[in-house]
Image (cartoon, helix red, strand yellow):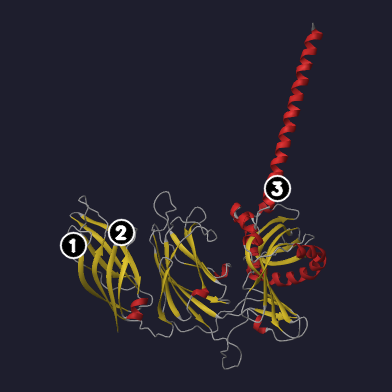
Amino acid sequence: MGLVIGFVLGLLLGLALTIAFVLCENQRSQARRKLAVSTAAFSQLNVEDVRKLFSKQSLPQWVLFTEYDKVSWLNYELRKMWPSIDQATSELTRVIVEPILEQYKPPVISSLKFQKFTLGTVAPQFVGIQKVETTDDEIVLEMELQWDGNPSIILGVKTMLGVSLPPVQVKDIGVTGVFRVVFKPLVDTFPCFGAIMYSLREQKKLDFKLKFIGGDIKAFPVLAGAIDGMIRTAVTDSFLWPMRQVVPILAGDYSDLLLRTCGRLVVKVVQAKDLLNMDLFGKSDPFAQLFIRPIPARRKRTKTIDNDLNPVWNEVFEFEIEDPATQKLFVHIFDEDSVQASELIGSTQVPVRELQPGSLTEYWLPLVKDLGNKKENKYRGQVQLELLYMPLDVDSRPEGGTKSQTPRTTLVNGVQHHRRASSLASKLSSKSFIKPAAVHYRVLSSGDDQLAASGTLGVTVIRGENLVAKDFNGKSDPYVVIYMKGSKAKMQKTSVMRKTLNPEWNQRFQFPVEDARNDMVVVEVWDRDVFGKDFMGSCALTLSKVLTERSYYEVVTLSPRAAGKLHLHLEWTNA
């Protein structure tokens, strides 16, 4: 009996295994057929089809942009040459970067030197290459670069107390960006160009890890964070465009290739409105951070306005411009938090090349979370800027006969070494400001205008339009309050208009102004009630436009959103 049972069980088990094997083989066969069909179909796709099917993040530049070409041949040659390149460039890179590390070292560190610096055995990979069309006497190539290298970088660190810390190893480096090479000037002597200029045109990613040799870096979290930030700043300030390294090939004067300050950008951060609230309780505490080059020494920030989604800053900053054709002004609005890191509300940017030199321009710019995502459409508020780009005269020379601009780099023994930029030799005289709006903008004045700084401002409140209802009957009893933000001029107000959302005032007010370039007129609309008042909306206007036009009519949108509009007339009389 047991023999029969065992035979039956064995037969069933064998049958089950056979069926499972057949099913598995059928599935594998179907998977292979599907893969073959997919591969055959994919091989028929052109570049346009690939762009439609896959996200931009998963595709190289030569697929995304037709002007990029594949460079497998270049990567093959680069791998062969990399041992020689490592030996030739490791010392050069150390000489360039080490002074920058010293420049940005935190106060607790007295000395920071490379004990070892090699680029390792893994060569970078160029994903795509393109020729950049320019009008200058030059050849410009841009290559998308990816490098997950194994360099050997060891830093010796000594504190202000004279204590030497364990050596710091920089490891697991990952870099992604766009590498720019410029051959300039073109000459009739072989190799037909005088020098090579190279730079990191765009830095998309920079990752690395720090490790104490013979110790635990987690035991020094503050120091580790300081060294991390210092290395990132040094790389940015050494290689990120417009910084450049110049290598002469033929004998000659290449001082014109060196990075020089060629102008200044004056930025007035006027205000923001309808900012996205980042706080769970209360409102955001916004401040603005601005920069042209993303290094700490050249970042500017406004004061923080507490508990306000429509902050008014009216603060002025200056930036040096080295390459107006490619540089941009970046503005980030943050919500300051006393407990944790500040949270980004939104960002915007303005290319310097879009500004008319010497003319004041006003912008109202929408904020976005990610400047690289053009499809984002969530409303995060707007920021108002006034911008004035003032080029320097490249050929202007002071009495000593030398050029007025200080080179940002120098050529030493055929190699360009970075040194810290000096401030502008002399400040340009203060001139008129600028204005834009929703990416709306308008030129307000020419830099040649000599604007009066003091006088009398006349404001006529003409009427309101579609004001917000504050009363139970769907109406309001609005009146307008006007005052100067930066002076002690007396606050003035209109009469109260009963039960209307479209009031007509036609009332004129005058304000003495001492510093028109830095003052603002604030207009607030209130609803009068029997036992108090309700805020309906407000706006703040700089005096830039009235200084240049002397008289103008303006329809202003009140903040917050859907608060309605005011029709105003402003006029200016010199003191």
- Which numbered disc flags the more N-terminal residue, 3 or 2? 3
Who's the residue at 34% across and 70% down the image?
A: 541
Residue type at tag 1: Met
Q: The residue under label 2 is which amino acid type?
A: Ala
Q: Residue 284, percent across and down?
A: 42, 56
Q: Secondary structure at mark 3?
A: helix
Chain-order first, disc 1 or disc 3: 3
Query: Foreground mark, 1 or 3?
Result: 3
Query: Disc 1 on helix, strand or loop?
Result: loop
Horizontal arrangement in the rendering, residue 191 relative to residue 200 (left or right): right
Q: Nearer the viewer, mark 3 or mark 2?
A: 3
Please state which amino acid type lies under the numbered disc 3. Answer: Thr
Q: Quadrant of residue 202?
A: bottom right
As measured in the structure, the alpha-carbon distance from the residue carrying label 3 to the one carrying label 2 is: 58 Å
The picture quadrant where one finds residue 435 is bottom left
Number of on-image labels? 3
Where residue 163 is drawn, which disc sits there?
A: none
Instruction: Identify the residue under disc 3.
Output: 39
The N terminus - image quarter: top right
Residue 106 percent coordinates (x, y)? 62, 65
Identify the residue at image location x=47%, y=64%: 288
- For the residues marked 1 and 2, what is the alpha-carbon distance in whole angstroms? 17 Å
Asked whether, in this view, residue 22 is left or right of residue 532, the answer is right
**Residue beneath disc 2:** 563
* Residue tagged 1: 497
Residue 75 or residue 572, whichever sits in front: 75
- Contact flag, marks 1 and 3 (Cβ < 8 Å): no
Q: Kindly indicate whether the residue at mark 2 contacts the one at mark 3 (C-beta within 8 angstroms).
A: no
- Residue 483 can be seen, yes or no: yes
Location of the C terminus (image quadrant):
bottom left
Element class at badge 2: loop
